[in-house]
Amino acid sequence: MKNQHDFFQGIMTVQVEGTLIEPFLQACIKRGCYITNMRRVDPSIVILTIRLKDWKTFRQLRKKYRCKLSIKSGKGVPFLLQQLVSRLSLLFAFIVAVVVIFILANTLWSIKVDGLSPELEADVESKLNTYGVSPGKLTIGMKDPIEIQQQLLEDIPDLLWIGVKKQGTSYHLYGVEKTRYDTDKNNRPSDLVATKKGMIIETFIKKGRPMVSVYDVVRKGQVLATGQLVEEEDTFVHSEGEVIAETWYRVAQTLPLKQVLMLTDGTVESEYHLKLGKFSIPVWGFWRGEDGDFREEIHGSDWNLFGFKIPIHIQTIDYYSIDRKAYESSKKEIEKLGLSSARSNLQQELDPDAEIKEEKVLHLSEENGKVKLILMYKVYENIAETKYISQGD
């Protein structure tokens, strides 16, 4: 049999197994198939080489002669093209993955601005947008952070300093605003007047002419120091200083004798939800009943991708079992609690420099299970307030 090696059409090494190998091969040859390099492995197995285009004929006749075919190898242009295509698809998938990762890693996902007022922060973000620096854009081709910093300082006069730092796929800016002083306002003629009634303890007048003395009792709105340096002359200054006065505060407190204390034994039941934006999907523990008294604590876990917060997270709700215990306090204990609470509330209302000098219980009574407490506090505080003088009068 003539040996044909058609490299361009492709050749295959095939193993034929069966009891009717010879009739099978004769039938294939009659159909125009070319067989070469044939060798017998054992009485029922033969290995031979055929053309790729003859493979269809072999498959069609194998059932008739009860032969089993298996491909050992293939050579030629068709097989080379097949390997090349499979490798190209793998190479293409690898290149696409690298490109996608490169794009995601070089995309600006967020901009954070700290240290500025909301108005100035909005101005900075608007300027960044005009520079082409905004979330969703590639950082390739963007200006260097130092250039952005310099341009922001030039374009926004209210910025004293701003730092621009690139952190992964986000920009972090920290700015300092310029402090502007209204010099004209501070030079306007003014008096110092009392903000409330009190008895003068000390005076510290830096500018202006004092109008009160120590131990004088003044009313609200009374002039403490005037900017008119000489009486009946038009020489005015901006008054500055402090006037410390003794003031009085009346504080009323009503507290129940019976207190309710909420205790927990540490027993907790958890419920888990998958949060998709504003929607919540129960995942686990949602079958918990509503019986009993519970204290609820909600925890959330945020997920980030390349520094960008995605709108999907797990929400955990912990329910702690509560046992309410009621106990009754004595009138002395309630009085002590009321004194502490009243002093704390008063200190929150006063200026930080104010000092509580004395406290006195004016009235203490018990009615309908409650204790009514009326207290008087003596406080030393600055009562001076600037009031500008209208010179057109």
Image (spheres, rainbow, N blue to C red):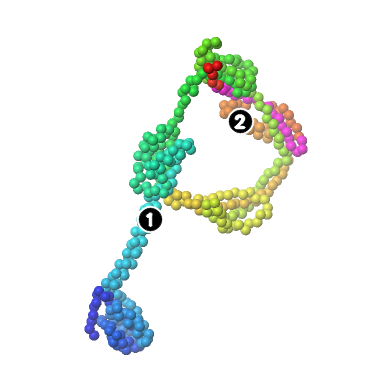
Amino acid carrying mark 2 in the image: Glu
Question: Relative to the observer, which residue lies in front, 154 or 246?
Answer: 154
Quadrant housing the N terminus:
bottom left
Question: Relative to the observer, which residue lies in front, 369 or 385?
Answer: 385
| Whole-percent x, y for residue 105 in the image | 39, 51
Start and end of the magenta stretch? 367-386
Residue 150 falls in which quadrant of the image?
top left
Q: Is residue 100 visible?
A: yes
Position of 357 compared to 373: left or right? left
Residue 349: mark? 2
Question: Relative to the observer, which residue lies in front, 377 or 385?
Answer: 385
Position of 134 compared to 351: left or right? left
Against 41, residue 244 (above or below) is above
Residue 2: mark? none
| Whole-percent x, y for residue 190 in the image | 53, 19
Against 343, residue 228 (above or below) is above
Residue 280 falls in which quadrant of the image?
bottom right
| Whole-percent x, y for residue 224 in the image | 58, 18
Question: Relative to the observer, which residue lies in front, 38 or 195?
Answer: 195
| Whole-percent x, y for residue 141 in the image | 34, 46
Q: Is residue 69 magenta?
A: no
Residue corresponding to mark 1: 100
